[in-house]
Amino acid sequence: MGDLTIRNLDDRVIERLKRQARANHRSLEGEVRHLLTQRVDRLVRLANFRERTRQLLSRTLDMRQTDSVVMLREDRAR
């Protein structure tokens, strides 16, 4: 695993991170590691989702699409 150094981080940010770490029963380093990992994982999942939706769209371009609002209204009217 690699190391990361963050310089010139505002003291208020550090204090908030420390409070958050204490609340989550983690060290400051563990909290920062957790937050960075969460953020990167979220971005990867979002990129994967967007790619899957592009693929789905490319497969359904020639199909007639129905507005979901219309479908919901029809269903409620039954």
Image: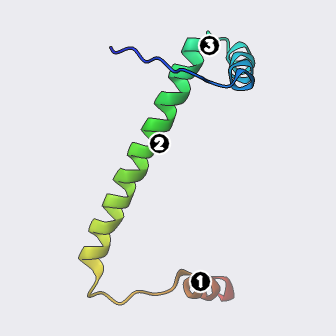
Q: Position of residue 28 (x, y in %)?
A: 62, 13
Badge 3 is on which residue? 28
| Residue located 64% across and 86% down the image | 73
Mark 2: give few (<14), some (14-19) or many (20+) Cα within 10 Å.
few
Residue 47, compared with residue 53, is above or below; it is above
In the shown orientation, is residue 59 left or right of residue 8?
A: left
Q: Amino acid at mark 1?
A: Val
Which quadrant of the rendered structure holds the N terminus?
Answer: top left
Label 1 sits on a secondary structure element that is helix
Q: Amino acid at mark 2?
A: Arg
In the shown orientation, is residue 19 left or right of residue 30?
A: right
Q: 53 or 78: nearer the eye? A: 53
Q: Position of residue 30 (x, y in %)?
A: 55, 14
Q: Amino acid at mark 3?
A: Leu
Q: 59 or 8: nearer the eye? A: 8
Q: 46 or 70: nearer the eye? A: 46
Residue 77, compared with residue 4, is above or below; it is below
Badge 1 is on which residue? 69
Label 2 sits on a secondary structure element that is helix
Q: Position of residue 70 (x, y in %)?
A: 57, 88
Badge 2 is on which residue? 42
Return the disc, 1 or 3, that comes first in the chain's sequence: 3
Return the disc, 3 or 2, that comes first in the chain's sequence: 3
Distance CA(mark 1)–CA(mark 3): 47 Å
**Mark 3 and mark 1 in contact (Cβ < 8 Å)?**
no
Q: Position of residue 54 (x, y in %)?
A: 31, 67
**Mark 2 and mark 3 in contact (Cβ < 8 Å)?**
no
Mark 1: give few (<14), some (14-19) or many (20+) Cα within 10 Å.
few
| Residue located 75% across and 18% down the image | 19
